[in-house]
Structures are given as structure tokens and as C-alpha cells.
Image (tube, rainbow, N blue to C red):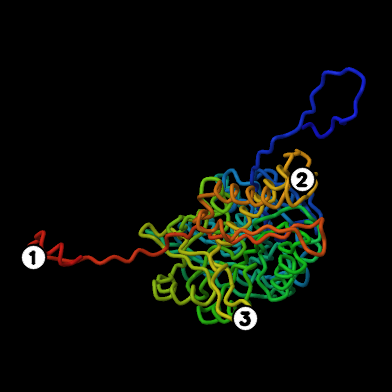
Amino acid sequence: MASNIPANLTAPIFTFDVQSGGNFEAETRFIVLGHGLPAGTLPEGGIALCNTKHDARLLVGAGSMLESMFLAARRNAPTQEIWIGRVADTGTAEIRTITVGTVPADGGQGVLQIAGETISIEIAAGATANAVASAIAAAINGYYNSLKGYSLPFTATVSTNVVTITARHKGTYAAGIDIYIPVLDAINAFNGVLTFATATPGAGVPSLTNVLAAMNDDPFEIIVSAFGDATSLGLLDTFLNEVSGRWSYAQQIYGHAFYPKTDTSSNLASFALARDTWHLSMIPMLSGGGLATPEYQWVSAFVARIAPWLGGGANGDVSRNQTGLVVQDVLAPRDRNYWMDYATRDAMLKNGVSTWSVNRNGDVTIDKIITHQQTTDGAPDTTFRDIQAVFQVTYALKKFRADLAFEHANKALAQDNPSNLDAVTTPKDIRATLFHTYQSMPGVLKNAIAVLPSIVVTIDQDNPNRVNAQLPMDRVNALDIFAGLATVYSQFTTSAATASL
């Protein structure tokens, strides 16, 4: 029955009430939180949709942390909806020096890597140290990777033979930005010529408060933070918690936060174990092995690589094993001793730390992304350990809510409906909707028939306007481990095969 056409009309009319029959479509918004530059149009504490590298440059400035995070995300998720949130920097910008010593008389090619980006200087025969220093400063300031869109995270000045480089943002983050003289097939003219020093260490830890407030009640299912300090993580966990945050009954916006952390494997595990929550995931880097990719770029690339699958509820992508996915625009540690072997990965995963690997081509690949959940009410619990679980539940709850709204919104509630009035719904009707919705998500939830008896819908005894429901959800699991028995024979026979069974 048309809900907008009154039942007591008298004057003749031939009309239709037009309304939607309901068509659920999930969305998975991705937002990166980091520093921008005053040259950009996005104010501190502001958020904005960002589609292209040109947009990123206009919004947050060339060479900014946020520009780099966006570029890494876009390279790994070409069609993902990506937003950026500008976090104000605070404190002191890191300052380093590059001192040019005795230059080879015959000149040559000098190659320097900064944050994984390569600058090359052609040194003329007889060039002075001052000239080389000027060339290095000019190359740093003018650097632009036209294929990928990256600029360098430092600006440079020069005085005689000393290049002074200053981080584009204030804060301690810059201490982890890598500068390296690579080994070339030919001689690198910078070998033994350049001396690096930190003149002023970066200081200051930013606050996420304003940018989280700017997100208001807009949905952002994937939140990537450049900052993994305890204060920032505390804010993110509170922002997302199930008591009063985005996972609470009062908000129902959902979302999950990812952050980077660089340390030894034991320290990473200790850090994760101190955070028993399924609202946070660490994307780690092992310190000491020659890490060219900055933390903020690393975490953005990793999360963007799985983002399309995390939003894939209709086709079951959200439930997939993610092992082996190649992450674009990140570099493996230069020292192979810092590549995660199986024993390291297994131990890290048991202690709340996500893992990665390096394939035969030297590409960094995802091994397994997990949350920090360890217990519930003090008892060991791995229900929300896998990242798939968080996004399976997100998709399922959104679809349940949508279908319930399509079928039961603006209805009266009764225990039964003998006249089959369109304006009335019953607990039995609602239970049927829940079951049919459950069945419609075979790539997310399984065992619908077995779960059916446990789906309970009742009218509340104290409030007749309220329906209470119990809805068990048996999620589809990722195929992470294959454990087979390979039996070797000198001569295979049917009887031997039967015996082995």
C-alpha cells in the first residue's frame, strides 16, 4: 500500500506514490591522516576528498607527508575513494647537514637516495666541493618524480661545501627518513665524499584531536594514521570504541585505524601486547636494516593494497586470504637479515603484530594483517584478530540495517498480523528479514541454516515499542594455512593407497 496516499480520500484521482524498493550498496571510505604544508589550500584540522596527484599537491603542498601518503595509496588502490586529513605539526623541524669532502678529480656520477627516491649528479672533472654542494641542493629542491608524483621530504640550502636540509614538517617523525649512498654497477662518485650529520633533531608529537573532530559523523571505514605514538593511538581507540565511539550502538559508523611502527621485533611485540583492542592494527618496520621508505608512506601503501578487498562484501573479497599481495611504492630493507622469515612472522602474529614478506623479485608483499585483540573480559579471544573479521562485520551490519529499514521502517508493531496489513510488522517478519539477509551474504557469513534456530526476535516486555533480537553471525574464514601429508613411495599401488587412508 502506498504510504503517502491517505486512506480517506473522496475526490476522484488516479495517482501513484513513488518510493524505492531498496538496493543496498556498500561504501568503504579511506582517509589518511598526516601533515600538510601552508602552501596547500587545506587548513590544519581539515579534511577533503582527494582524487588525483594534482589534487593532493594543491590541497597539501609538494613534498608534504600527506601528498606522499596519498600517492602511495592511489598507486595501490587506483579506484579507491580517498580522503585526506591535515594534522597540524608542532615542535621543531629536523635539520641535517651533508658535507661535501674531496671530490674525485676526474668527476663522475654521484647518486644519493633520499626517502627511497634517487637523485643523480653528474660531476665534471675538476669540480670543487662547493660546486657539488650547490648541485646537490638544487637537485633536492627541484626533485620531482614525474612518473609517480613524489617530491622529497626535505628542502635544502647551501653554504660553501655544506648542504643543510630541513624536514618539511616539525616533529620526531623525520628521524626515520632514510638518506643513503647506494652501490652502483659503476663507481658512485659520492662514496667517501659525503658526510652526514643531524644538526637539530626533530621534536614534537602532533595531536589528532582536531582532525578527528572534523570527521564528525561521516563514515570512514579505513583510517590510516601516520602517527603511532601512545597518545595518538589512545585517541584513535577511543574514537572507534564500542561503548561511546564509532562502534557504539549510538553511532553505528564503524571504522578501523592503521598505524606504522619501527622498532626491533621484540619491542614491536611488547608495544602491541600493551594494546588489547580490535580497533587498531600496526603495520611494522624492523629497525636497523636500511629502511628507505618512510613510515607514513609504508603504512598508507600497505593498507591501500587491501582496501578494495576490505570493501568487497558482495563478492566475498572481504573474506579472502591476503598473503602474497605485492605492495607498490615501498622498498624492502636493504639488509636481508631484516626480512621477516617464517619464525619471525609466526611469533609476531601471535603477539598482535601484522606481518609482511619479500618475494623472489625483491618486492614487499603482505603476509597477514591483524588487529591487537588478545582477550575479551580477560579471557583469550581471537574473534577479531584477523582484519577480515572487522570488515566482514562492518559489511554485514550495514546490510542488516539497510534491509531492516527497507522492509520495516515506518511500520506498526504487533505480535501477529492476521489481516496481513502492510502497515504492521511482527517479530516473525523481522526474523524472516534477518534470515534472508544472512543468506544473501554467502561470501561473508556461512552456515545460515544452522544459525537460523538461534535467530530470536521478541517484543520487549517493558517497552512494547521495542524489538529485541539475537543474531549470531558465523563469518567466512580466510584460507591462511594448508597442511598436507605428502607420502612418498618407491612403487605406488592401489593397496598402498588404501592402507594410507
Q: Nearer the viewer, mark 2 or mark 1?
A: 2
Type of residue at label 1? Ser
What percent of the width, then of the height, locates residue 273?
58, 80
Which quarter of the figure is the N terminus placed in? top right
Residue 274 numbered mark, or none: 3
What percent of the width, then of the height, locates residue 110?
49, 59
- Residue that numbered label 1 is attached to: 490
Type of residue at label 3? Ala
Q: Secondary structure at mark 1?
A: loop
Give me the residue at 39% from left, 72% from top: 342
Q: Nearer the viewer, residue 147 or 215?
A: 215
Can you tell which quarter of the image residue 209 is in? bottom right
Marks 3 and 1, how far apart at CA: 53 Å
Q: Residues within 10 Å of mark 3 (few under 14, many from 20)?
A: few
Can you tell which quarter of the image residue 394 is in? bottom right
- Residue that numbered label 2 is attached to: 409
Q: Nearer the viewer, residue 79 or 173?
A: 79
Which quarter of the figure is the C terminus placed in? bottom left
Q: Is residue 46 left or right of residue 32?
A: right
Q: Image height check: is 376 above or below 151?
A: below
Q: Is residue 412 left or right of residue 498?
A: right
Q: Nearer the viewer, mark 2 or mark 3?
A: 2
